[in-house]
Image (cartoon, rainbow, N blue to C red):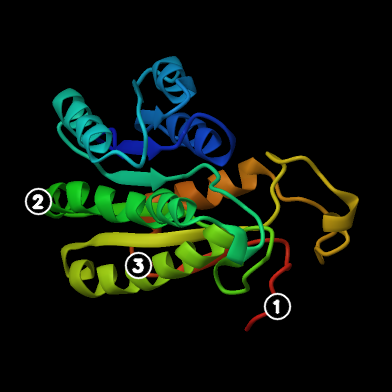
Amino acid sequence: MSEKAVAIVVGGGSGMGADAARKLAVDGWRVAVMSSSGKGEALGRELGGLGRTGSNRSVADLTALVEQTMAAWGRIDAVVNSAGHAARGPVLEIEDADWFAGMEIYLLNVVRMARLVSPIMAAQGGGSIVNISTFATFEPDAAFPLSGVFRSGLAAFTKLFVDEHAATNVRMNNVLPGFIDSFDESAEIVARIPAGRYGTVGEVSDLIAFLAGPRSGYITGQNIRIDGGITRSV
């Protein structure tokens, strides 16, 4: 990259989002990081970029992050959308308010950010949106009810987005991690994974960085599993 590319990482305070921000910075990107905890703000500054505290459920916070990034660097080449965790439990015991929250956390977070950055990316010749999704997108898992339901919706939204925006070189792809070492390891879960281990946040970050940059320029609208073989569907 002759001119430093710019990436926004939403939900980058810890785990896979934070590691993706670090990986992009190491690769020479300028990074703007936001999380609700304050850790994203600190990380962005640590990486020599921007940091902001805010929620991926807030249009005002997302708008302010985009405006701050544009004011600093005048371009946005990639967005990485990560998210925290919504309520869990038996599906009929999850309250309506939690379903609505899950929709905002796992689906509308991407829709809202795409509205903000797609015109910017199209005007500058292209860009990439990478969403950290879940292996449960196509094989629902009772342990992740809201995530699985709304990220199935995210997969459908991604296809519709690509239909409208691929011609302007604005891409969108979803990364579908299995069990990753940012979470506590369980022997019972390891036994379900053909690879026999949890994945690492570094492995996920490598995939995100590839999808964010120009080497993946012909990859768009895809849901790419990085799950050690735990999903079975063809």
Return the residue at label 1.
Answer: 232
In the image, 220 versus 159, the foreground residue is: 159
The answer to whether the residues at label 1 and label 3 have Cβ atoms under 8 Å apart is no
Q: Nearer the viewer, residue 192 or 125?
A: 192
Q: Which residue is painted at 45% across and 61% down in the image? A: 174
Answer with mark 2 or mark 3, whichever residue precedes in sequence.
Answer: 2
- Residue 170: % across, % down: 24, 59
Q: Earlier in the sequence, mark 1 or mark 3?
A: 3
| Residue type indicated by callout 3 | Thr
Q: Look at the numbered disc 2 and give the secondary structure of its residue.
A: helix
User: What amino acid does circle 2 point to?
Assistant: Ala
The residue positioned 29% from the left and 36% from the top of the image is 6
Which mark is first along the chain, 1 or 2?
2
Which numbered dot is residue 123?
A: 2
Residue receiving disc 3: 158
Q: Secondary structure at mark 1?
A: loop
> Mark 1: which amino acid?
Arg
